Amino acid sequence: MSNTAAAAPPLPPITAQQLITNVASAEATAFSGQVQVTTDIGLPDMSALQNVLGVQAASWTSLLAGTTNVQVAADPKTGARAEIDSGTNAEVMVANFANRDAWIYSSSTNKATHITGAADAAKPDATPPTDATPPTPAGIAQKVIDNLTPSSTLTVDATQTVAGRAAYTLTVAPKVPGTLISSVTMAIDASTWMPLSAKVYSTELSGKPALSVAFTSLSYATPDAQLFAFTAPAGATVTTQDLSGSSDSTKPADAGSLGTPTAKVVAGEAWSAVTMVTGLPAQVTAMLADPSQLAGMLNGGQGQGQGHHGPESQKSASAMAGLIGQIAQQVPEGTAYSTHLGSVLITPSGHVFAGAVPVSALQAAARANQ
């Protein structure tokens, strides 16, 4: 089934609150299909990142700019899987609920990361308050409505067909000025109430979303359980990450030196809010403020005294620095990074300002909070 244009399917009228209630009350369902992700948030051409970050440009990096097709499958009782197959290499993420583990594998490098202990990391020993009441779908929907309506308008628009499924369209648009986001639209399956697509529109673009995630094919048949049973190929390099906290190898070398970062809204509200983060380690903010250092970190520490100074390493670091430099700008208040959906500003004092707003709003917030 393809996501082709079709006449709006006839569906019974529904309010935004009832639609949200139906989504909240829907039981998780098994499915498989293809999701198309299209990203146009103002990043430069990412093809220069080929082989940087240990992956091919046509795989995970394409999620940052361009169009990527992702094969997905999920079974609430068994696991979940996402795979990008470019024809020459595959990038796979698999979670197995029975084994309580996950795998991330790249055929381009033949390297796999095995994540264990995720279930143990969330200790279920917290006792809920005696006066706590179980949330209900209607209650959840009401909270969503209450939280959104002061700053947003919620409307149910024309119906649509997504991946062969009749769907309602819910649009959420900000009432407040100053944000880079003009609206968010979601297609909701009229039978299963599962979201089928989400599109985020920017004030910087006209007529097309800055980010679109949508099914192009979909089946609600239960996927084969073997999809969630991953085994690293012969010869693959496997790294294990234990999230249970029982392994010292997963702990920072000097956790006490990291401090406790704090975040608070210092300007705007809701969609136009500007958040200030303080207390980050000095080396982190210094790196964020210097595109060349940030490029070196993303490129595996190359160029930062870790002994990787071969021609290919230097080429990769140079390509990364060039890309980051295209979205970085020096302003009187520090170093800013901007996209069509949000901006970040790092000041010389180590304060970080961020929000779904233009850089100018971050500059004003920084001047008021030095």
Image: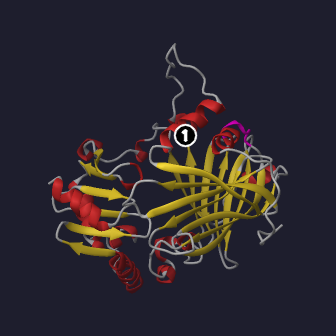
Q: In this view, does 172 lie to the left or right of 350?
A: right
Regarding residue 300, the answer to whether it shows in the image is no
Please tell me in which quadrant of the rendered image residue 71 appears: bottom right
Residue at (22, 61) in percent of width and height:
364
Q: Does the magenta stretch include residue 298?
A: no
The picture quadrant where one finds residue 86 is bottom right
For the point 70% across and 36% down, the residue is: 25
Which sits in the foreground, 122 or 183? 183
Task: Report the residue that reaches farthest toward the front.
Answer: 13
**Front-lying residue, 17 or 237:** 17
Image spot of residue 323 (x, y percent): 39, 79
Image-based side of 203 in relation to 359, left or right: right
The picture places residue 95, in percent across and down from the top left corner, at 65, 49
Q: What stretch is highlighted in magenta?
A: 24-28
In this view of the protein, which residue sits in the foreground, 39 or 223?
A: 39
Q: In which quarter of the image is the N terminus?
A: bottom right
Residue 61, image x, y percentages: 53, 72
Q: Which residue is drawn at 44% across and 73% down?
A: 204
Task: Give the main secondary structure of the magenta stretch.
Answer: loop
Q: In this view, does 103 lie above or below 163?
A: above
Q: How crowded is mark 1: few (under 14 residues within 10 Å), some or many (20 or more)?
A: some
Q: Say if residue 298 shows up in the picture.
A: yes
User: Which amino acid, by three-letter code, is at mark 1?
Assistant: Val
Residue 126: x %, y % from top left: 49, 22
Find disc 1 in the rendering and name its residue: 144
User: Which of the two residues, 270 or 100, is positioned nearer the viewer here?
Assistant: 270
Lateral position of residue 168 relative to residue 312, left or right: right
Quarter where residue 212 is shown: bottom right
Quadrant of the rendering where the C terminus is positioned: bottom left
Q: Residue at x 25, y 59 (%)?
A: 285
Q: Tell me the element at label 1.
A: helix
276 vs 167, left or right, is: left
